[in-house]
Amino acid sequence: MSKFITFEGVDGAGKSTHLAWFADALRQHGPDVLVTREPGGTPLGEQLREILLNQPMSIGTEALLMFAARLEHIEQVIKPALQAGKWVISDRFSDASFAYQGGGRGLDWSKLSQLEQWVHPDLQPDLTLFFDVPVEVARQRLTNNNASLDRFEQEQADFFERVRAGYHKRVQQNLRRYIVIDAAQPMDAVKQKLEKIILSL
Ligand code: TYD
């Protein structure tokens, strides 16, 4: 049976590295795995990503564009793949909008719930892995990695504290679909945890 799995965490938590490893390990057990990401995942979504990561805009616009990209992603990629029996792993999904636009930027949680209801009333991840790490550790990893920082990554520590708190709130509201992973541990310890998760799936 196909599954929809999402990866979440503050910038610098290491989720993208772990995602690549997880997808490869999962494929070795047989499933046809599609890896995708948000914002993005479709040609239009990738154009919106470019704008979202670089162009200053109001908070409401940011939330609406995130969900616009998401609607496209769901209709063009996620649902067709699940219907074809594939497993879909997405690097971020709506939890990121609650954490970043809700927690980080302070947009009303209820507005985000309305958008979620509109854009995917009948779809939620089967499983969400939340890579949780203290903000100082995540900041350190981001600055060690020489890549240039996007509009979100350039935010200050207090923004990321609010993002992290937003994720924690979302976890509390959706305990059954979440696994919280301590991403401050060494990579190997995280991999061992991921291996166990794969076996349980
Ligand atoms: P990220 O997933 O961290 O990609 P990369 O590892 O390539 O930098 O980048 C996406 C950024 O978009 C990240 O800073 C979080 C932000 N974001 C939101 O603010 N809201 C959302 O709904 C989504 C999906 C992402």
Image (spheres, helix red, strand yellow):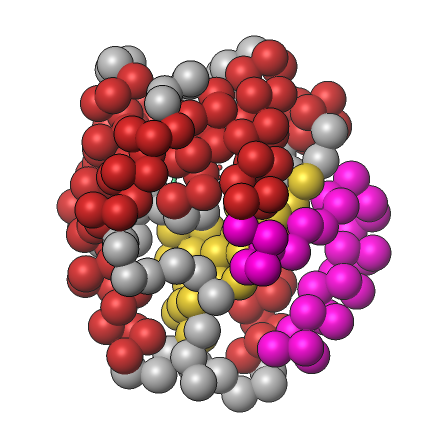
Q: Which residue is depicted at the point 71% across and 35% down?
A: 133
**Residue 131 magenta-highlighted:** no
Residue 91 placement, left or right of 18: left
The N terminus appears in which quarter of the rendering?
bottom left
Could you say where residue 96 lies in the image, as x and y percent from the top left? 44, 38
* Residue 14 in sight: no
Q: Is residue 90 above or below residue 63?
A: below
Count the marks.
Answer: 0
Residue 5 placement, left or right of 180: left
Could you say where residue 90 lies in the image, as x and y percent from the top left? 43, 56
Q: Which residue is depicted at the point 68% across and 25% down?
A: 135
* Residue 158 in sight: yes
Q: Is residue 92 above or below residue 140?
A: below
Judging depth in this view, the residue of 94 and 24 nearest the camera is 94
Q: Quadrant of ligand 1?
A: top left
The answer to which quarter of the image holds residue 66 is top left
Q: Is residue 168 above or below residue 77?
A: above
Task: Give the extent of the magenta segment.
Answer: 174-201
**Residue 199 magenta-highlighted:** yes
The answer to which quarter of the image holds residue 9 is top right
Q: Which residue is depicted at the point 69% across and 79% down?
A: 199
Magenta span: chief secondary structure: helix
Q: Which residue is depicted at the point 24% across and 28% down?
A: 51
The C terminus appears in which quarter of the rendering?
bottom right
Could you say where residue 14 lies in the image, as x and y percent from the top left? 64, 43
The answer to which quarter of the image holds residue 197 is bottom right
Could you say where residue 143 lies in the image, as x and y percent from the top left? 64, 22
Residue 175 placement, left or right of 76: right
